[in-house]
Image (tube, helix red, strand yellow):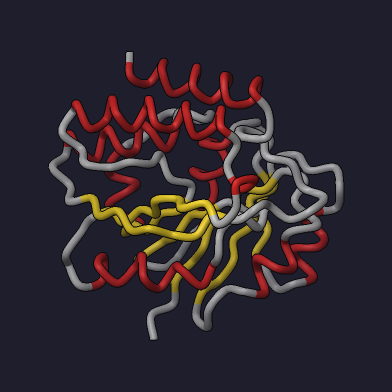
Amino acid sequence: MHEVDVVLPCLDEAAALPGVIGALPPGYRAIVVDNGSRDGSPEVAASLGATVVHESRRGYGAAVHTGLENAKSDVVCFMDADGSLDPGELPRLITPILAGKAELSVGRRVPVTRDSWPWHARAGNAVLARLLRKRGLAVRDIAPIRAVRREDLLALGVTDRAFGYPLELLIRAAEAGWRVLETDVAYRPRTAGTKSKVSGSVRGTLRAVHDMAGVLR
């Protein structure tokens, strides 16, 4: 069995962490990167056996990069910590990496209910994915769940530390000639008591699209 570190960027996800960490498959180790939570998330994560690290710079990309730096496994996974994604999907994502069939494996969100993915978030995602396809990268989601070899990702040199990180990752992967494999994953309503920093509001979506548009420019 391959041990795999799973980076979970975290900002006020105390309500969701027990379900997320508890659902990790055997051999998958949680690294919770706290990005300034005020709801006791770091303490909850530690009580569940997760490795907890702190990133004082606010931003999704900052938390992801800090988690990557603290990971030890060859293959590292990244996913949101709000309960919207099933950690049980991770073995399917790492399989093509271990088999040498892809350098980057990402999930394409498939909503399980109408409320899982608000219209404004779907629309913003669709626009950005279309722009990526025009650049030759056949993806339909700027996914919040992915698997990649740690050293490969470090060498790729992604610099964005805000919401533009996932998009820059895909752009740099395409420029580097990486094989990027997209797999459908279930997308559920986030755990009650948590709030999306991106898709939970039109303002959040616009902020994320603004960050990502800056990457495209």
Looking at the image, is 158 positioned above or below residue 10? above
Q: Residue shown at 53%/83% (left/top)?
A: 26
The residue positioned farthest toward the front in the image shown? 114
The quarter holding residue 169 reads: top left
Looking at the image, is 87 positioned above or below residue 123? below
Q: Nearer the viewer, residue 122 or 146?
A: 122
Q: Residue shown at 54%/67% (left/top)?
A: 87
In the rendered image, the quadrant that contains the C terminus is top left
The quarter holding residue 43 reads: bottom right
Looking at the image, is 206 positioned above or below residue 133? above
The quarter holding residue 47 reads: bottom right
| Horizontal and vertical percent position of residue 115 | 64, 45
The residue positioned farthest toward the right in the image shown? 39
The residue positioned farthest toward the bottom in the image shown? 1
In the rendered image, the quadrant that contains the N terminus is bottom left
| Horizontal and vertical percent position of residue 145 | 46, 53
Q: Is residue 167 left or right of residue 122?
A: left
Q: Nearer the viewer, residue 23 or 148?
A: 23
Q: Nearer the viewer, residue 49 or 168?
A: 168
| Horizontal and vertical percent position of residue 98 | 25, 71
Looking at the image, is 42 positioned above or below residue 133? below
| Horizontal and vertical percent position of residue 185 | 44, 59
Q: Residue shown at 43%/45% (left/top)?
A: 143
Numbered marks: total: 0
Q: Nearer the viewer, residue 107 or 166?
A: 107
